[in-house]
Image (spheres, helix red, strand yellow):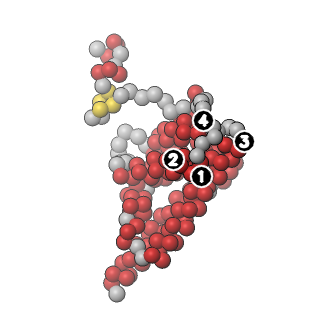
Amino acid sequence: MHQTAVAAAEAAGDLAGHARALAHVRDPSIDAAATAVDKLRTIVSRYTSWHARHHVAARVCQFELAGLTSEHYDEILQVRHQTNRVFRDIVAHGVDEGVFAPVDVRRVVRSMLSLSIDLVRWYRLDGPDSPEQLGEFYSGLALKMVMNTVPAELAPPPSADRRNGRASSQARTTEDT
């Protein structure tokens, strides 16, 4: 009986985490965005920053699904499908408008979601990037996946080549030496 109660509690937590992530990408600010570019930039930024800010809970939600009963797994799968659909609709709309390149929508969206989700494996709030910084950076990467060119104001900013938390000697200017 104890294992059943634990499994039910874990499933409820997983479902709640997935539902919160879905609510985060259904925010009115995404629908209010004027263009497909703005919608994609906003949704990827929000989804990424949510996973970074809640990286511990998100890690459990995303990578501990094997312990769920098939019924609980199916519930979570439905929420995940809804999240995927929100992203796919935005990308497909951009392709249909001719704003985005003619990409394989499912594969591109899978890549975007994977980028945003996988950061929960390594992200730390006390690291060099805030959740919002990662969100903005990843949104620029997402735009590069769907556009032939990315407007300069939306492209991820160039950063110094970093190894072990320090700028490499190749990234230093003569002023640094």
Task: Say if 176 sits above or below 165 in the image.
Answer: above
Residue beneath the point at 46% across and 71% down: 73
SS of the residue at dot 2? helix
Q: Nearer the viewer, residue 30 or 96?
A: 96
**Residue placed under numbered mark 3 in the picture:** 97
SS of the residue at dot 3? helix
Alpha carbon of mark 2 to alpha carbon of mark 1: how far? 9 Å
Residue beneath the point at 42% across and 76% down: 69
In primary-sequence order, the first of circles 2 and 1 is: 1
Q: What's the residue type where badge 4 is placed?
A: Met
For the C terminus, the image quarter is top left
Residues at discs 2 and 1 in contact (Cβ within 8 Å): yes
**Residue placed under numbered mark 1 in the picture:** 87
Horizontal and vertical percent for residue 156? Answer: 50, 33
Tally of numbered tags: 4
Q: What's the residue type where badge 2 is placed?
A: Met
Alpha carbon of mark 2 to alpha carbon of mark 4: how far? 14 Å
Residues at discs 2 and 4 in contact (Cβ within 8 Å): no
Alpha carbon of mark 3 to alpha carbon of mark 4: how far? 12 Å
Q: Which mark is residue 147?
A: 4
Alpha carbon of mark 2 to alpha carbon of mark 3: how far? 20 Å
